[in-house]
Amino acid sequence: MQLLRLRPAFAGCDVTYATVNRDYASEIPGQRFRLIVDANREQKVRLARSCFSIFRTVLSVRPDVVISTGAAPGYFAIRVGRLLGKTTIWVDSIANAEELSMSGRKAGKYASLWLTQWEHLARPEGPACFGNVLGELPAREPAPAGQAATGGRPLKLFVTVGSDVPFDRLVRTVDAWLGRSPVKHEAFAQIGRSTYRPQHMTAAQFLTPAAFQEKLAACDLVVAHAGMGTILSALRQRKPILTLPRHGSLGETRNDHQIATTRHLLRLNAIDAAFSEEELLARLDAAGSLASATRISDFAPDSFTSRLNEYIHARRASRAR
């Protein structure tokens, strides 16, 4: 999602996109697409398979530049690219708002250009900051007065927890709220690997990217974990989004980066958020009065993408001499 927002930076380039889910080919119709193996640090065998699949892809594509926004496969791509003498660019995910990701810290020594998307994380020795994929956000307009969820029209909710790890706490809390609400709301939940089965909303484990966008377009409010893919998609469609960040201490993710991300995005006035089940219930009670979302542009700010484009073409020119 973040790399697609950087597409203007690839102007004048012959681009091949590689990711871990074949369904994402629908996001880039007509573009070259390669499938690589996903893995995380706990999956030792899959890590080896992921590294091999990336090595094979880089050998086959023979790129001048390898660019990634993160996670283990992205780190391998940077390492393989550097090993084969390619220009390598690491753009640490905007989700890492208080510290660089583990992959980002390790990738820095192998990246020709090492970037963070938060100015306060930039250092003279690296990483640098060219900007972030959100850019400046205009102020959100308040919702019409008196339009509270419990006293006004029924709402269509889209609940989504992503696909990596379960998030029963979010699914259970929203389901409980729907069950007690005096207004009959309509809700659909993408619950991933969550073990809790909702009683008051239709649910599916996973959605294709196309189905995800359809559910998003049809809803009045998104209720989600603090995943950047979901947040960026909601802002692009100007959908209000209420997030409950995962807690590392509860085993919902490896660390508390979602809490940090949520705090920083709240300061940017990009989202609404709750940090506990009780707060989420209270925010849902007033869902109709949440501020409407601002709509972000289709791409990252030109100040970011043009600078990245200049760097890419300068490196290609210097290597050609």
Image (cartoon, helix red, strand yellow):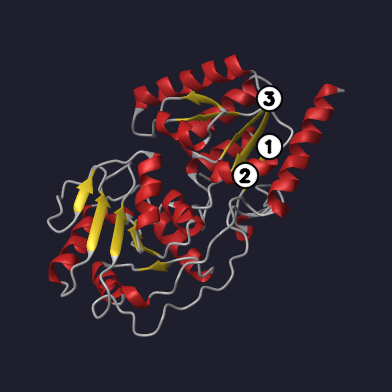
| Contact? badges 1 and 2 (CB < 8 Å) | yes
Classify the position of the C terminus by image quarter.
top right
Front-most of 130 and 219? Answer: 219
The disc at residue 86 is 3
Residue 256, visible in the rendered structure: no
Residue under the point 56% across and 59% down: 296
Q: Mark 2 vs mark 3: which is more N-terminal?
A: 2
Q: Which mark is residue 6?
A: 2
- At horizontal 35% and vertical 43% (from top left) the residue drawn is 211
Q: How far apart are labels 3 and 1 at the CA level?
A: 16 Å
Q: Determine whether, in the image, residue 96 is placed left or right of residue 90.
A: left
The amino acid type found where label 1 is placed reads: Phe
Q: Three-letter amino acid code at disc 3?
A: Lys
Q: Is residue 268 above or below residue 33?
A: below
Which residue of the protein is positioned furthest toward the right in this rendering?
321
Residues under labels 2 and 3: Cα distance? Answer: 20 Å
Residue designated by label 1: 10
Q: Nearer the viewer, residue 199 or 69?
A: 199
Left or right, 21 with respect to 112, comes to left
User: Tag 2's secondary structure?
Assistant: loop
Residue 297 vs residue 102, the one in the foreground: 297
Residue 16 placed where, x, y %?
Answer: 59, 27
Counting from the top left corner in percent of width and height, residue 287 is at: 32, 73
Q: Position of residue 162 (x, y in %)?
A: 34, 46
